Amino acid sequence: MTMQKAEKIWFDGDLVPWDQATVHVAAHALHYGSSVFEGIRAYALPEGPAIFRLEEHIDRLLTSCKIYKMDMPYTRQEIRQAILETIRVNGHRACYIRPVVFRGCDTFSVVGYTCPVHTSIITIEMGQYLGPEAVQKGVDVGVSSWNRMAPNTYPAAAKVGGQYINSQLIAMEAADRGYAEGIALNVNGFVSEGSGENIFLVQDGRLLTPSLGSSILNGITRKSVVTLAEEMGLEVCEEFIPREVLYLADEIFFCGTAAEITPIRSVDGIVIGAGERGPITTQLMDAFFDIVQGRALDRYGWLTPVAA
Ligand code: PMP
């Protein structure tokens, strides 16, 4: 999926042409993964684009900066304004928004405190991450031979560039095996998450999802799914999930900003439930898409309109 260039990128306070938003090859982040980032979606509502859970994404960006001791020189308000401005100037109706904060060029020392901290906001057009058929029929996935990181290696709560080398191993292996995505276990053998998605299982009418102690990113779509499930009166359990529980689930789905809610129809070649999108997954997808596509009231205040 090659990205479609937008006209402008916000880079350290200026809106610059896409091709001019470049970085030096000695940048610390390029060598040591010292970049923190977010992935956010703006949806096309009839009255214009609206950003899904913008404040929560800015919160997580600031959390990642705090953990990695990166002094981003912009306030929350400035970042919010910059995101809105970038979408407006590029004339997107809907888009994927990628803020990135990274250590630039000063030293090859692993301690990058002296490197300038750069901030950029990139926007691109994006459709369904795992393909349009995936949302309807579900995807075939496999449990990865790569684990998620142990909690004392690097912190799962931070969305940091370097961490995505683990995601790359999981996703590349899945692609090479012919799967749409991989499911990683944590170092204790419990289900963790996909390379870029959280995971939910339906078992006997209950919703199960790995707890924050299972080396997962604290996903914003995950939180939204929990809210919608509770609204429907479903019991939601956050727990340690052994691998075989995947095979025995009635339904499984991924969720994340890019993947939105994507059903899983098989794991390791074992058919899940009826081998198609299940009824509870469908109910949750309907509730989610009704809000982000403007068919239902934004009753949780999840959407920020881009129009001034
Ligand atoms: N886990 C990982 C590893 C991710 O990269 C993402 C995508 N940000 C998610 C889960 C889902 O998080 P969110 O719903 O906040 O996009």
Image (tube, grey):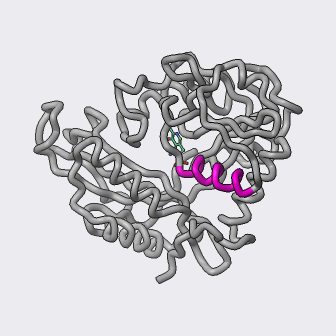
Percent position of residue 151, x then y: 40, 27
In the rendered image, which quarter is residue 266 located in? top right
Residue ranking furthest to the bottom: 308
In the rendered image, which quarter is residue 145 located in? top right
Q: Residue at x 51, y 17 (%)?
A: 188
Question: Where are the magenta residues, as a range?
Answer: 220-231
As displayed, is residue 115 above or below residue 298? above
Residue ranking furthest to the right: 274
- Between 79 and 16, the one lying in front of the other is 79
| Res 15 visible | no
Asked if residue 284 is among those painted magenta in the image, a careful observer would answer no
Percent position of residue 212, x then y: 50, 36
Q: Residue at x 80, y 46 (%)?
A: 280
Q: Residue at x 46, y 83 (%)?
A: 308
As displayed, is residue 64 above or below residue 142? below
Residue 76 shown left or right of residue 281 in the figure: left
Percent position of residue 11, x then y: 30, 61
Residue 213 shown left or right of residue 285 in the figure: left
**Which quadrant does the N terminus fall into?**
top right
Q: Main secondary structure of the magenta part?
A: helix
As displayed, is residue 43 above or below residue 216? below
- Between 115 and 201, the one lying in front of the other is 201
Residue 200 shown left or right of residue 304 in the figure: right
- Between 72 and 115, the one lying in front of the other is 72
As displayed, is residue 93 above or below residue 217? below
Q: Residue at x 39, y 68 (%)?
A: 80
Asked if residue 221 is among those painted magenta in the image, a careful observer would answer yes
